[in-house]
Amino acid sequence: MTRDVAILGAAVLPVAKWQQPRDAALQVLEHEVLAKIVIEAVADAGIDKSEVSSLAFAQPRPYTQQKYFATFMANYLRLPCTGSVQEILGNGMTAALAFEAAANDIRLGRSRVALALGINWESAIPAVEHMMNSMRATGDVDFHAPFGFTPISWYAMDAARYIHEFKSSREELATVAVKNRRHASLNPIAQFRKPISLEDVLAQKPIVEPLGLYEVPPRGDGAACIVLVDEDVAKASGRPYVRVRGSGFFHEGAHQINEVPNDMIALVSAQRAGQAAYLEAGVTASDIDLAELYAPCTIIEVLASEALGLVPRGQGGRLCAEGATSLGGRIPICTSGGLQSRGHPAHVTPFYGFFEVWEQLTGRAGRRQVANARLAVSSAELGNYNAAMIHVLEGVR
Amino acid sequence: MTLAMQPIDRVRAFPPRLTEFTQRFWQGLGNGRFETTRCEECGRLSFPPKPFCPHCWSARIVWTPLRGRGKLYSQTMVHAAPAVFEHEIPYRVGIVDLDEGLRIATRVLATVEPKLDMAVEIIVLNYRDGPLFAARRCPELPA
């Protein structure tokens, strides 16, 4: 018999360029920043430090000088743990896997309070240098990288295919960026908050055609801590909390492209993981009040929303243009501002997704609040959605 | 069947590594030969070539030639590239579905934006230090 898991508190650093250049006299260092976020999150949950017994870290970027960061932080925070202390890596899915690792300690009864946490520092590393790393993470080093594929070039090819198959257009897909910036303008922790028009988006320099600068993720730094507890602890607290109703995972056994030609833009992993999460939660896509999707590029939000059944296949772009996925629309998507505007500190990005869901389902989202929000779906992925982890979360007030 | 070849007077920006197993692919490519592995147990092809069958895990594989023809499934022009490719921007990359039922990723050579699903052929780019391959529009109309 496994235990039920709830989120009882959370804190994040506003996404921004925090990392200092290597030669700067004064550094803004990861452990100092994350410690502050942890203390804030644990206070938010009304939990005493002594109750924390598991730490599941998203692995930092390779630029973080302090290695074995998890065990270093257990020392820095003086946190003896009886559950586990671990550091997890899974590309863009990293923070969702860390969330699951913390949840699993609770499900198995190893911990009653577990922290899912991490910090992603990378913005002072020039993009051309960073891409020397990331191109080796999103492709076969010997059979893809030699041609010059970049992480987002795969998403660009999704966009080209989607436009081709569904008679969509760059203009239609670009409305996702406009909508997400409008959402971010209401989010104090978002990296970019100044509203933009469709013309602004279309006027940006091309990055990976058909996508321009505002249709791909910016680079930024972030840190987050989510406090997961046994639902009994949440109930006893008398505070509003978020219950983990269901989770699903699927890896299609392919890396970037499937050597057996398939429907690349169906995002089969999101479909399969989503079905598993809905099934466990006992809900269907039509029950969902809002979705916080891991979508580095505009096109990916469209594809993921279709794969999760939130909008019909081939219509995600058009429905975004019509406002269905905006705040106040039928199914608000990425009320945080999404990865383009809230920001994308990749190894902790899914934590920011959980944070937005936490704020929405506990009624703390301020001007972004989705009225009467009770059920949310969140996603995380790696590669070109070759794997997906989907959560269904429920607000309990 | 030999692929068309195009000499390129520079070294590859990020050359593939060779193993005892994959060197046959790259050396063959340099001579215009495009081939991969097929499983003798289940009959399925694999790409990249592998010393076993990823579908049934059999070790009984044989090398088999590929025609080097297919359709362009998708493509993009890259304007922001890793350091080693910076001098090449902008450049096109794409995904090709080969006639044999394999999906591969490759450079795409085109002076104007290519239409998806158009017939393409694979050619060899012979750099000073070794080969890569690329896709370009088929000289003939698709059948």
Image (cartoon, rainbow, N blue to C red):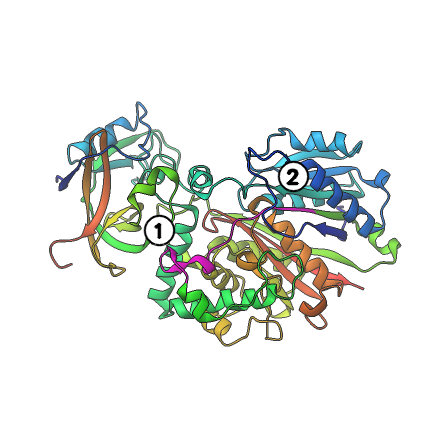
Does residue A125 appear left or right of residue A279 in this picture? Answer: left
For residue A209: magenta?
A: yes
Amino acid, disc 2? Val
Viewer-proximal residue among A84 and B17: B17
Asked if residue A176 shows in the view, the reply is yes
Q: Mark 2 lies on which chain?
A: A
Give the number of marks: 2
Is residue B60 placed above or below A299 in the rendered structure?
Answer: above
Q: Percent from the top left, x then y, of residue A210?
A: 36, 60
Does residue A39 appear left or right of residue A155 in this picture? Answer: right
**Mark pair 2, 1: CA separation:** 31 Å
Q: Give the range drawn in magenta.
A: A204-224
- Would you call the spot at circle 2 few (<14 residues within 10 Å), some (14-19), or many (20 or more)? few
Please tell me which residue is depicted at 64% across the width and 35% down the height of the picture. Answer: A26
Viewer-proximal residue among A283 and A141: A141
Assess whether mark 1 and mark 2 are in contact (beta carbons under 8 angstroms): no
Q: Percent from the top left, x then y, of residue A187?
A: 65, 62
Please tell me which residue is depicted at 22% across the width and 34% down the height of the picture. Answer: B10
Q: Which chain carries label 1?
A: B
Asked if residue A313 shows in the view, the reply is no
For residue A138: magenta?
A: no
Viewer-proximal residue among A137 and A308: A137
Is residue B15 placed above or below A3 in the rendered structure?
Answer: above
- Would you call the spot at circle 1 few (<14 residues within 10 Å), some (14-19), or many (20 or more)? some
Q: In which image quadrant can residue A242 be found?
A: bottom right
Name the quadrant of the N terminus of chain B: top left
Q: Percent from the top left, x then y, of residue B126?
A: 18, 35
Residue A368 bears which disc, if any?
A: none
What residue does disc 2 label? A28
What residue does disc 1 label? B79
Name the quadrant of the C terminus of chain B: bottom left
Please tell me which residue is depicted at 77% across the width and 52% down the height of the picture. Answer: A9
